[in-house]
Image: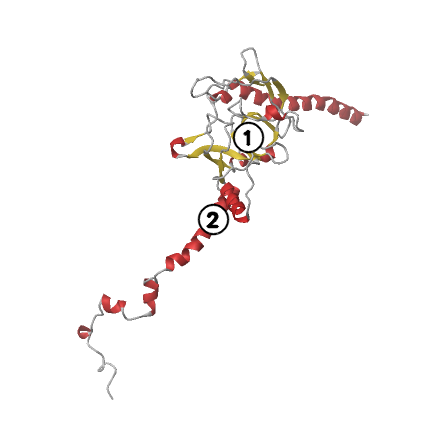
Amino acid sequence: MRSEAEGAVPEDEQTVTSAEETADDGSPDEGKRKKKPGSFWKELPVLIVVAVVLALVIKAFAVQAFYIPSGSMENTLQVGDRVLVNKIVYHTRDIARGDVVVFNGLDSWDPETQVKEPGNPISKALHAVGSAFGVAPNEKDYIKRVIGIPGDHVKCCDAQGRVTVNGVPLDEKSYLYTDPITHEQNKPSNDPFDVTVKPGQLWVMGDHRELSYDSRSHRGDPGGGTIPTDRVIGRAFVIVWPLNRLDTLPIPGTFKQAAFKATALALPVTPLALGLAGAFPVTYLMRRRRLK
């Protein structure tokens, strides 16, 4: 009987299969290495769905794009600008004076711009997607600058025609609307007002004061013109479109005055002082009862 070793082909006589022969041998591995024509187009719908789902998740929890439909924030924001809104920032810090915020005005403010209702289901679906991705206007959302936070006394105007917050005048020249032709700048307000912002509310104004339908125009509403803090969607922090308008939206320097910090530090002191003042007589009476 011949051994298996006798029938084996010597190593130096074994043939090497060429790449061309391997490509044509129809082996199962070949299907893995070589995609069939048209497979990309079959995968494309899945890729689109995954991209949309990821975008919606990001929009819901982190960053959302918004379309600017009106001139109420000119020159800071122009009609047609797209901004990105940070929806996480107010989980890490409070809303600050000078922030440009997007908020939902449903059931509290009338829309500044009337958006024509789509006439058919396809148009409605496209408009909903466009609103979600910031390429179409949404009449229920507003964008304004925060002037007063809870507890602030906001007034206009002082002897120099300026808005004051807790008696501190604002220098608003860096962001108030300036006419590109006449170079005239809006006044801080043509209408006088004097309000104290209630807890959980904000006093907001547009940078184009002569055009903006803001807190001043809603003083007859239940909130006295203020908006609830829980209706704030997030802080607009950058302009992303058009590309020639690419820019950040920082807090203007006037809101960083040292006088505001002093005011903020004084606010919690008052209730604490009252609490301490009330604690002394209570402690005294308790001690007397123990001695009896």
User: Do the residues bearing badges 2 and 1 touch, measured as CB atoms within 8 Å?
Assistant: no
Question: Tag 2: Cα neighbours inside 10 Å, few (<14), some, or many (≥20)?
Answer: some
Report the residue at 41% width, 57% height from top: 43
Residue 251: % across, % down: 48, 26
Local SS, label 2: helix
Question: Tag 1: Cα neighbours inside 10 Å, few (<14), some, or many (≥20)?
Answer: many
- Depth check: give the residue in front, 170 or 91: 170
Which mark is on residue 95?
1
Q: Where, quadrant-wise, is the N terminus in this rendering?
A: bottom left
Q: Circle 2 is placed at which residue position?
A: 52
In the image as oriented, which residue stretches furthest toward the bottom? 1
Number of callouts in the render? 2
In the image as oriented, which residue stretches furthest toward the left? 12
- Say what amino acid the circle numbered 2 marks: Val
Residue 261: % across, % down: 54, 21
Which mark is on residue 128?
none
Report the residue at 23% width, 67% height from top: 20
Q: Where, quadrant-wise, is the C terminus in this rendering?
A: top right
Residue 117: % across, % down: 56, 41
Q: Is 251 positioned to the left or the right of 109 in the image?
A: left
Q: CA distance from mark 2 to mark 1?
A: 30 Å
- Closest to the camera, between mark 2 and mark 1, is 2
Q: Is 177 positioned to the left or the right of 34 in the image?
A: right
Q: Return the disc, 2 or 1, that comes first in the chain's sequence.
A: 2
